[in-house]
Amino acid sequence: MSEQQTLHAQHIVWRPSEAEYARSRLVRFMKEQQIADITTLRERAAVDPVWYWEAMVKHLELTWLRPYDQILDLRRGKPWAQWFVDAQYNYVIDAVDKHARSNAAERPAVIWEGDDGATRTLTFRALAEQVNRLASALRHLGIGPGDRIGIFLPMLPETVIATLACSRIGAIFIPLFSGFGSEAVATRLRDGEAVALITADGFLRRGRTISLKATADEACAEVPTVRHCIVVQRTGESIPWTTGRDHWWHDLVADADSTCPVEPTNADTPYMIIYTSGTTGKPKGTVHVHAGFPVKAAHDMAVCFDIQPDDRLCWLTDLGWMMGPWAIAGTLLLGATLVIYEGTPDWPQPDRVWRLVSRHAISVLGLTPTVVRALMPHGDHWPQQHAMPSLRAFGSTGEPWNPAPWEWLFRVVGQERRPILNYSGGTEISGGILGCTMIEPQKPCAFSGPVPGMAADVVDEQGNPVRGSVGELVIRQPWVGMTQGFWRDPDRYLATYWSRWPDLWDHGDWALIDEDGFWYILGRSDDTIKAAGKRIGPAEVESAAVAHPAVQEAAAIGVPDPVKGEAIVVFAMLRPGIPANPSLAAEIQDTIAARLGRPLRPERVLFVPDLPRTRNAKLMRRVIRAAYLGRDPGDLSALENPAAVQAIAEAARNGTRS
């Protein structure tokens, strides 16, 4: 049986309890709408998005500065759908002001833990004051509606404040990965014509001080539109300073007005440009609006993760990955508590993330399969030292699961009673296309179905629906949160998502719906391998590779082959202490062949110390393939570990060949 067949033959391993049903916000919404079950809800929402999203924004009790005249306007076609026509909406009112003026004012809004164990807490009242002070300071600097501001910070309380302050005055923020080099920062600031950059002197990572200000200075030197650089004092290290341009955050906010009127932005006013790396060319500036991304984030948290005011959500992320802005906007809109963490999940010991959950009473923990694969080899005893009574569910996104790490998280950490809420979508989506909910059964590695409100489908090469076999993931109807295109590049947006089939959003993922109605993501369709006439996703090959006890992680690519069309090459990271040798490579090849069939036996297995991945833990297979073939790998600015690319190239030239 192939790995794909093994996945889909899995039995249900978790079912919701009566308590989960009784608590569920999704159940309450369905009762309000007189909907009998979630299948009916999904089906009705898919064919009638106007009904669904109007009902949902009423359920979320959004505060309109001016009511909408029309829910959805499609006069420009689906790619340019306009929601909440003629409405005025600034999401900061719902994320901050509403709670600060209510009996939730003294409830924690943001809890932060630093790499060094330091902590800070902001109540909703305190958050509102700090947001107003920074917003007033920005206005005093001459920054206003429509101006772009880069935010180049790790996950600090000031990071949350900065995003909200920008939105409060109608400015547009550009989130930047805290690990970016100066060129990557400059490219995004230059494309957005940013007038200001908010950064820090530095931050802590694995006990070391990482400088940010010098990198920010190098970037600003390449962007003549940047007039101001606002610096958070995190580490206290000596930093370069440009008088007139540079401002200490604490000096700016000390005397700033703590009552700053909100800018009455329109529902479709941009509030964020978040860049994603393209396979070729410059990064894509994805445009999101006030009544888009924040509303979709809050919606998905409510219906998939059942986030309510008594919850504490922590997602291991950076602001530069969409899950950072998603966690900030969605959690606060729902009046829940956001827990943010500066450090890494395994430092100074492999139980750091479990200590984080216990210390801050986190109820929903979001992580990636890569994090779990990295923690597994340290042993079961690390999570078992922590009872984590507050934790009720895991969130997972970023990449497809392999069965072994999914089972470890569910069985060892989750004690077979905490569901793993699989969630997959994208930066341009504002959240999920597919997801799980707290009121549906679970199979390992699977999704319960489309996130309600997402008219998702799986189609063949002609655009016809398919069931029980692999196809392309598409979306048939527009949704609240859909990007308003790429910044000043509408043609690229249309070519990327709308050019393959008429009126279908082509997401670029391989997906499958099994006989029980569970959905699976099998990887990016542009990563697909076609060897000996058989099409297979790299995740399937990688799952087979990590079934060998020596392999900690693997990446599979297809390379040109004169006989097979494409041959499979696997790059393997071995578990600590296991030496690489040709006989081990052959064993791994045989393990893959036994699981997938002899025609899919890899041509080569090469050993590397690390695999190129983005800062949100996605494997960069296009980069691996380009490095192996000696081609231009394209945009590498999102890589967490650029040195891994050279290791791939060296392995291709000199590595173990079976």
Image (cartoon, rainbow, N blue to C red):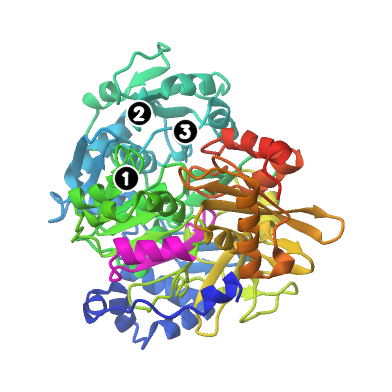
Give yes or no for residue 23 being in the magenta stretch. Answer: no
Label 2: few (<14), some (14–19) or many (≥20) C-alpha neighbours in 10 Å: many
Start and end of the magenta stretch?
Answer: 403-430
Q: Which residue is mark 3?
A: 179
Which amino acid, mark 1?
Answer: Pro
Q: In x, y percent, where is residue 410?
A: 35, 66
Whether pointer 2 and pointer 3 mark residues with C-beta atoms closer than 8 Å, the reply is no
Q: Which residue is mark 2?
A: 203
**Local secondary structure at mark 2:** strand
Identify the mark nearer the N-term, 2 or 1: 2
Label 3: few (<14), some (14–19) or many (≥20) C-alpha neighbours in 10 Å: many
Whether pointer 2 and pointer 1 mark residues with C-beta atoms closer than 8 Å, the reply is no
Measure the alpha-carbon separation of dots 2 and 3.
Answer: 10 Å
- Quick one: 600 or 36, which is closer to the camera? 600
Q: Is residue 267 left or right of residue 500?
A: left
Q: Which residue is mark 1?
A: 350
Which amino acid, mark 2?
Answer: Phe
Which amino acid, mark 3?
Answer: Gly
* Vertical relation: 620 (above or below) 70: above
**Local secondary structure at mark 1:** loop
Q: In x, y percent, where is residue 446?
A: 47, 71
Measure the alpha-carbon separation of dots 3 and 1.
Answer: 22 Å
